[in-house]
Image: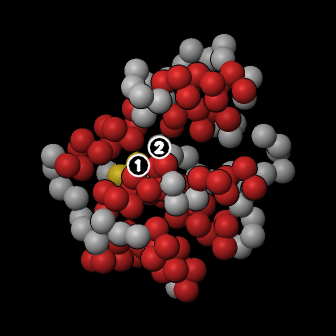
Amino acid sequence: MSDSIIFPRSSKDEIDGLPYFLRMCHKVRLHVAGELHQDYHKNLGKALDLYTCQLLKIEYADLVEFISQKNVDDQAVLDWAYSTGEKPESPQKDWWCSFARNLGFRDHLSERLADRKQTAGLAHRDDIRTFFDFMDAEEGR
């Protein structure tokens, strides 16, 4: 990817023990501002965005609307998600966090991860074992 792209924050960044939520909120803000690179548009509301919304029992479109219409920080968005949907507790939260952090490692998406690494010129990187690792590497983290 180009150096001129504003990358969303890392999937590994957490709030209330949840990975990925901060990245999803950042992608929404970048998209609303017209600053999200086209490469990210095809997965808006899909894949990990969808899985995160399913965990919280909220609709992605409602999340986008809330972020778009309010000048709120990430904690306020998470509080809204918990009050609108559901705040996951253990063991559901623990299972989901493990699933998200390990997506692509010896699972149904391992081949897809290998293909993405190859396409990005990162096939030689044995340290990239999950999609979280891949996103960070592709974005220069």
Sort mark 1 into few (<14), some (14-19) or many (20+) by Cα contacts within 10 Å. Answer: many
Mark 1 residue element? strand
Would residue 75 be found to the left or right of residue 95 on screen? right
Q: Amino acid at mark 1?
A: Pro
How are the colours assigned in the image?
Answer: secondary structure
Query: Which quadrant does the C terminus fall into?
Result: top right
Q: Position of residue 132 (x, y in %)?
A: 51, 37
Q: Is residue 122 above or below residue 36?
A: above
Mark 2 residue element? loop
Q: Which residue is mark 1?
A: 19
Q: Residue at x 55, y 46 (%)?
A: 10
Real-space CA distance between mark 1 and mark 2, rounded to the nearest whole angstrom: 5 Å
Would residue 20 be found to the left or right of residue 134 on screen? left
Q: Is residue 65 above or below residue 54?
A: below
All told, the count of numbered labels is: 2
Q: Amino acid at mark 2?
A: Lys
Q: Residue at x 66, y 13 (%)?
A: 124
Nearer-N-terminus badge (1/2): 2
The disc at residue 3 is: none
In this view, the residue farthest toward the bottom is: 69
Q: Which residue is mark 2?
A: 12
Q: Is residue 23 above or below residue 123?
A: below
Contact between labelled residues 2 and 1, with CB atoms less than 8 Å apart: yes
Q: Position of residue 67 (x, y in %)?
A: 52, 77
Q: Residue at x 27, y 77 (%)?
A: 83
Query: Which quadrant does the N terminus fall into?
Result: top right
